[in-house]
Amino acid sequence: MANTETSLKEALASIEGATGVALVDYTSGMALGTMGGSKGFDLSVAAAGNTDVVRAKMRTMEHLGLKGQIEDILITLSDQYHLIRLISGRGGNGLFLYLVLDAKRSNLAMARHQLKRIEEDLEV
């Protein structure tokens, strides 16, 4: 089991093309931890905004009567991928990992695989 800071460092260091990562509480919209980002890209602001994405998807699933669990949500931009991975089990209810990738330097399939492994090892 890894703590939040260790998990965020691992995500930033081990996932090719990662430029930022955050652990976010989507009930409050607050980032519980961030790593990376830049002056022009505030991870806390992005994390708060992505809570709306998660909430909207959950509402839509509820209205449609869908019973499955959201594993991840992908947003593709012309030069970035934004990956939202909901945390399941071990007290992770209401939390997600948010990963920003440089589209030119990343492998999306590998990033999803590695983020899943980091999520499984995360101690919340």
Image (cartoon, rainbow, N blue to C red):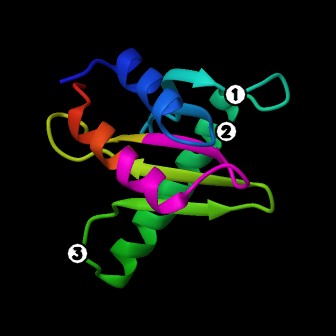
Say which label, 1 or 3, has the lower sequence index: 1
- Confirm or deny contact between disc 2 and disc 3 (CB under 8 A): no
Placement of 19 over or under 70, stated as above or below: above
Name, please, the residue furthest toward the bottom: 64
Can you give x and y, in whole percent of width and height, for residue 83 in the image? 53, 52
- Give the spatial CA distance, label 2 vs label 3: 28 Å
Residue hosting label 2: 46
Residue 107 included in the magenta stretch of the image: yes
Circle 1 or circle 2, nearest the eye: 1
Judged left or right of residue 19, residue 91 is left
Segment tinted magenta in the rendering:
97-114
- Confirm or deny contact between disc 1 and disc 2 (CB under 8 A): yes
- Give the spatial CA distance, label 1 vs label 3: 34 Å
Circle 2 or circle 3, nearest the eye: 2
Judged left or right of residue 43, residue 21 is left
Say which label, 2 or 3, has the lower sequence index: 2
Can you give x and y, in whole percent of width and height, for residue 85 in the image? 41, 50
Residue hosting label 1: 37
Can you give x and y, in whole percent of width and height, for residue 13 in the image? 51, 27
Say which label, 1 or 2, has the lower sequence index: 1
Quarter of the image for residue 39 reads: top right
| Foreground residue among 5 and 63 | 5
Image quarter (top left, top right, bottom left or bottom right) of the N terminus: top left
Circle 1 or circle 3, nearest the eye: 1
Residue hosting label 3: 67
Asked if residue 21 shows in the view, the reply is yes
Task: Give the residue at x 40% y 16%.
Answer: 5
- Give the spatial CA distance, label 1 vs label 2: 10 Å
Label 1 element class:
loop
